[in-house]
Amino acid sequence: MRFAPPNISRAGKSDCRTRSRQNSYRQVLLVLPVSLSLVCAHAIAQQADQQVRLLAQNTTQGQSPTPTPRVISKPQTVTEDENTASTANDTRATSASTESTNTANDTVADILKLLPQQWRTKIEELTGSSTDGSNQDLVRKIALPAVGVLALILVLPFILGAVLKRIFRRRPAEVSILPSHDQRLAELDLDDLDFSAKGAQASPDTLSTAVAADEKASQAAPAESIAMATAAEQEQASSGQEALTTDSTMVLDDGYSEDSRTLTTHPIVDDTQAPEHYSPVTDTNIETPANDSIQAQVPVGVSHDLPDAHHTSEEEGIKTMTGIQATNNQEPTPPQPPPVVSTHQIEPDLPKPMTKFGLWLNQLPSDLGSRYSIEALLYWVSYGAGKAKPGLREELNNAAELDNHGRIKKAVLTARPEVLNDVLLSVRTNFSSAQQLQILDLMLAVLVTGDGIKPVENLILRFYCDYTGMGIETLERRYHEGFNAELPGIPRPDRLKWWDNQIASDVHQATNSSSMLGIEATASESQYKMALKLAEHRHDPSRFDLLGDKERSLVARNLQKYQAIVESKLETEA
Amino acid sequence: MINLYAALQLTSDASEETIRLACRELSDREPQIAREAASVLLHPEKRRLHDLVYQQFVAMSVVKDRADSESQRFNDTNHWDRRFVEFPA
């Protein structure tokens, strides 16, 4: 087994770059005001000192506004006269400097005289200098520190602001999807999902278990087994008949029919009444053209658009379909545009939900609604693949009161198409493209096991990728990274051979106790370890850093199942 | 995907006996479809898987239709329109 390198996708790299850039911006924002403040303080102090000197000079020399000339030292080879003149100049300069200092001292002393006596006494105690101007270092000891303190007072708010901003800075809006104020609601309750092989065997609803049981039963008493299955089917069908009728009536009453596709506004579907079976296909909505040919009465004529049964692979099927489409004078499919990066900017008028459940999701606080939309999507995929806990529907229908998780499960278990629409809509409107990619990773990690993706999961994940704009290439790449295998072709239930393969593979998986890891039960220790490495790669927390803590903890808990299997295997062998 | 229930003019909760009768009726007009419907829908496990896939096709066709009607972006890399031909939303 060879592991795929843990590639970082373009979206992931871009995301990392964005975060790094944001950190740099924050550092600049912190350092810049501090630096500017210090520079300003230094400049203020210098300016004050210079002004004091200028003032002193003006007072002494009588008012020439020109600055004090700088004394330039002469070279050693000067003449005696020049030396004498230079000494005289130096003396004059020193004298002027002394005078200006004295004047500055006087000025400072004058300013200090304006202060109350108590303050002056305090300053004298602190500096050890007299404030009456007799001390020559008055400027150095009092004025400059005072300016420094003033500058510090000016700078301090900037520093404090920057520090507080750093401490209490908020997470980016797209990251903070978890509420901290409602722990009860924040519990991601996915206990009803059973992803383990053990759980799958315990659940009579799963296909693999049923196939295994069917195989066993057919060996023992085939006739009895078939009779039992038929009875169960009939019982199930009869119990669902009434609900179906109610459902169809309700949907039609709400105006959601084929004709309503032309309407610009869609009615809200009441999803509180959960039907046992949902099927929009009734006698009334089968198109019956005027020419009463058989094919027209039963809209199955398009089956000739699908690949012939003698093709051997899914890819061949797709190619054949494309070829037939070309012969039917249809224009070839144009190259698909690249995935759109930002959702919110392109769809200013967001579509409205179709169900009450969708409205409820929309009305929740955005962080809670976002998280619940992920939860609903996970349930949809899981329940859609037949992994719902047996009796859960009845349990929810009979419950006197449902919490939010129960409400989500109940809505999903109705399997109404409108619920899927609203869940996907919520995911698309509430999450960025990078987060939608991580949601795909989340589904691959916690819903798909090492034994491969199930047909329904394959379908929904493909659809999810197209709906969010990622496209099939993203799913294929992520699947290959996570499972070191190619993504199986799209399910082709229109082909008999596909059915045969499905049943055969499911029988194989049902008899494999280590199917969760995607290896045989008799696999070697190294194979177990390598399978665990793949699982760890799929559950790597960095793949979910844009999602919430609950999603990450769900991933961590799921990884523990894999680790427990491998540990158990290693202990057994030891 | 061929909409077998539509071909048989049945709903997804039809009983085995009902499906058997419908297949018999259809076999006169569409023998191949009737044969396929019988092989899938009269096999308990195949029918169970079929119904799961069928349910998703129904749901996805509605979502796709809604996306199209409201001009939402949809990167159709799986040629859903052709797969949903028999699943009018």
Image (tube, rainbow, N blue to C red):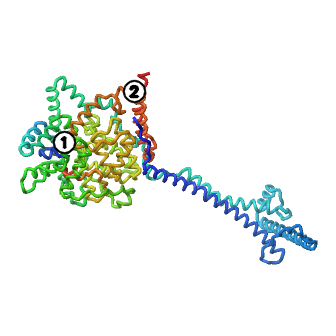
Q: Is residue A554 above or below residue A574?
A: below
The residue at the point 43 percent across, 23 percent down is A571
Q: Is residue A107 left or right of residue A32?
A: right
Please identify the quarter of the rendering in which residue B24 is found.
Answer: top left
Where's the N terminus of chain A, which quadrant?
top left
Mark 2: secondary structure: loop
Q: Earlier in the sequence, mark 2 or mark 1?
A: 1
- Chain under label 2? A
For disc 2, the marked residue is: A524
Q: Is residue A370 visible?
A: yes
* Whole-percent x, y for residue A368 in the image: 39, 48
Amino acid identity at mark 2: Ser
- How many residues crowd around disc 2 within 10 Å: few (fewer than 14), some, or many (20 or more)? some
* Whole-percent x, y for residue A25 in the image: 54, 56
**Mark 2 touching mark 1, by CB under 8 A?**
no
Q: Are marks 2 and 1 on the same chain?
A: yes
**So how many labels did they put on this image?**
2
Amino acid identity at mark 1: His
Q: Is residue A185 above or below residue A47?
A: above
Q: CA distance from mark 2 to mark 1?
A: 38 Å
The numbered dot on residue A552 is none
For disc 1, the marked residue is: A310
Q: Is residue A298 left or right of residue A130?
A: left
* Whole-percent x, y for residue A495 in the image: 19, 42
Please identify the quarter of the rendering in which residue A327 is found.
Answer: bottom left
* Whole-percent x, y for residue A131 in the image: 82, 62
Q: Is residue B89 visible?
A: no
Front residue (pair A470, A166)? A470
